[in-house]
Image (spheres, grey):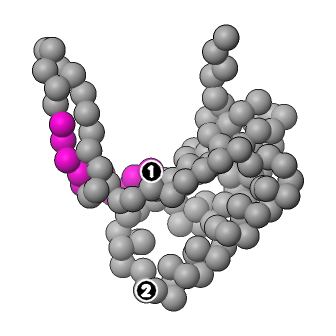
């Protein structure tokens, strides 16, 4: 089964982090990623730019509505990891190992398989 693990945290924590703190967090993510790679569960993942560089797009009454970020919520998705494991419990174990679990919340969602 494939699971997407979303990393959600308060963007201000990262924005206010010192260069040393950022370097430490990056190092932990590199170790975490390497551990998943060695275990053969990692399919992909990326870190996202802050919501201030993003936009939300919707269609309302046939018209495109675009709202530029930031969006106002203190917690935002900052990245994701796609893994392939045998159970939800195993996906939760990997989410709990993420450095993001210390600073925010990890959301674990099974990927719907079509076809």
Q: Which class describes the residues within 10 Å of circle 1: few (<14), some (14-19), or many (20+)?
A: many
Residue at 76% across, 30% down: 1
Task: Give the residue number, with chain letter if any, for mark 2.
Answer: 18
Residue at 59% x, 81% y is 24
Q: In the picture, which quadrant includes the C terminus? A: top right
**Residue occupying the far top of the picture:** 115
Q: Is residue 71 visible?
A: no
Q: Is residue 54 above or below residue 11?
A: above
Q: What x and y, as percent, mark residue 50?
A: 35, 59
User: Which of these two is toward me, 92 or 60?
Assistant: 60
Residue that appears at 39% across and 59% down: 49
Chain part drawn in magenta:
66-77
Q: Secondary structure at mark 2?
A: loop
Q: Quadrant of residue 64?
A: top left
Residue annotated with mark 1: 77
- Is residue 96 positioned above or below 115 on the image? below
Query: What is the x, y in percent for residue 110?
Result: 66, 31
């Amino acid at each position: 089964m494939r699971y997407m693990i979303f990393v959600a945290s308060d963007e201000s924590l990262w924005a206010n982090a010192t260069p040393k703190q950022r370097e430490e967090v990056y190092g932990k993510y590199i170790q975490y990623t390497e551990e998943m790679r060695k275990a053969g569960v990692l399919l992909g993942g990326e870190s996202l730019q802050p919501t201030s560089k993003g936009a939300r797009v919707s269609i309302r009454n046939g018209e495109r509505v675009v709202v530029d970020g930031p969006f106002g919520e203190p917690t935002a998705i900052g990245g994701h990891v796609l893994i392939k494991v045998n159970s939800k419990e195993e996906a939760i174990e990997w989410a709990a190992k993420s450095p993001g679990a210390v600073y925010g919340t990890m959301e674990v969602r099974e990927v719907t398989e079509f076809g």
